[in-house]
Image (cartoon, rainbow, N blue to C red):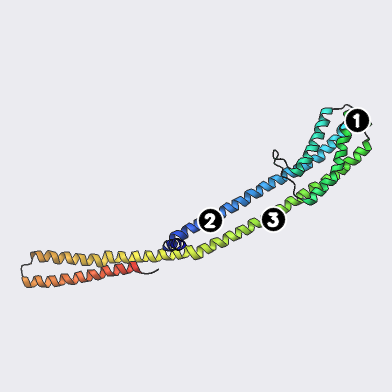
Amino acid sequence: MFEKILSKLKSNKNFNNYYLLVFTVIILTILIQSIIQYSLSRQRQDSLRINEAGRQRMLSQSIMKHVYECKYGTCDFSKLRLAMNKLANANIALQIGNEATGIPELNNEEIQKNFDLLQPHLNYIIETLDDFNQLQTVDVEKLTAETDQFLFLMDTIVGQFQKASEEDIKTLMIIELELAVFSLIILIIEIFFFINPSIKKMAIQNQKLKEINWHQTHAFQSHMKNIKNYNHVLKIEKNTAHKEELISYLMEELTDLEGVSDNMVKSLEKQA
């Protein structure tokens, strides 16, 4: 069965070469677009993650601001609770991911180590402020020190996220460049081994058509005209000897016409 398929492909070589070229262009276009879309998706995810990590620093500072207000001035417990919830939830999302916000799961061991170091400081902040009735007894200096450590580690994590994002972009750029070079090589091969031979074959076929056209317009028509003239004269000629002579000329024209026909067939049968 494979031999039958192969023979069919060989018998329709030009047609298959054309479709091979089209198929190659389509595949390369799909690959390049897939890489581009994947790159854009990764950049979007990295941007969301870096933005969320940056908000963690703002939230920790906002919590300290509310603590000072509650301890020494007017307290807005709802804003403090909201900031604490956002801080805890965002910390979880940055590690295990969040489909709703588009943040992917963390798969970087170095960054995870810093999250593990950061967790005790976060736990202290959340547990210390969990009971609003005990806010007046909170050790502000200790809380400030824990918040500073949280900020330091979060700054480190944001920097690591940024570095990882830049490395991903570089990798994707290299892949895109390699794919573009590969695409160019494939297209050059297609041009030299498929398109050029097809163009040459078309040129040869065009030459055949010109030869056939020449035989048709010059030799063939010339002999047909002579045959018609001899036939016309035969109809009106009364002399038997003259008729025999005309018939011999007519036969010569037919012979020449047969030669012209053979030349036309040979032109069609020429190999590319």
- Label count reads 3
User: Label 2 crowding class (10 Å Cα cut-off): few <14, some 14-19, many 20+?
Assistant: some
Between disc 3 and disc 1, the foreground one is 1
Secondary element type, mark 2: helix
Q: Position of residue 153 (x, y in %)?
A: 84, 46
Between disc 2 and disc 1, the foreground one is 1
Secondary element type, mark 1: helix
Q: What is the quadrant of residue 186 in the picture?
A: bottom right
State the residue position of label 1. Answer: 135
State the residue position of label 2. Answer: 25
Secondary element type, mark 3: helix
As displayed, is residue 8 above or below residue 243?
above
Measuring 64% from the left and 55% from the top, which residue is drawn there?
A: 176
Q: Which quadrant does the C terminus fall into?
A: bottom left
The answer to whether 132 appears left or right of 272 in the picture is right
Query: Residue placed farthest to the top in the image?
Result: 74
Q: Disc 1 marks which amino acid?
A: Leu
Q: Where is residue 135 in the image (x, y as percent from the top left)?
A: 90, 30
Q: Disc 2 marks which amino acid?
A: Val
Tell me which numbered mark, 3 or 1, is placed earlier along the sequence: 1
Circle on res. 171: 3
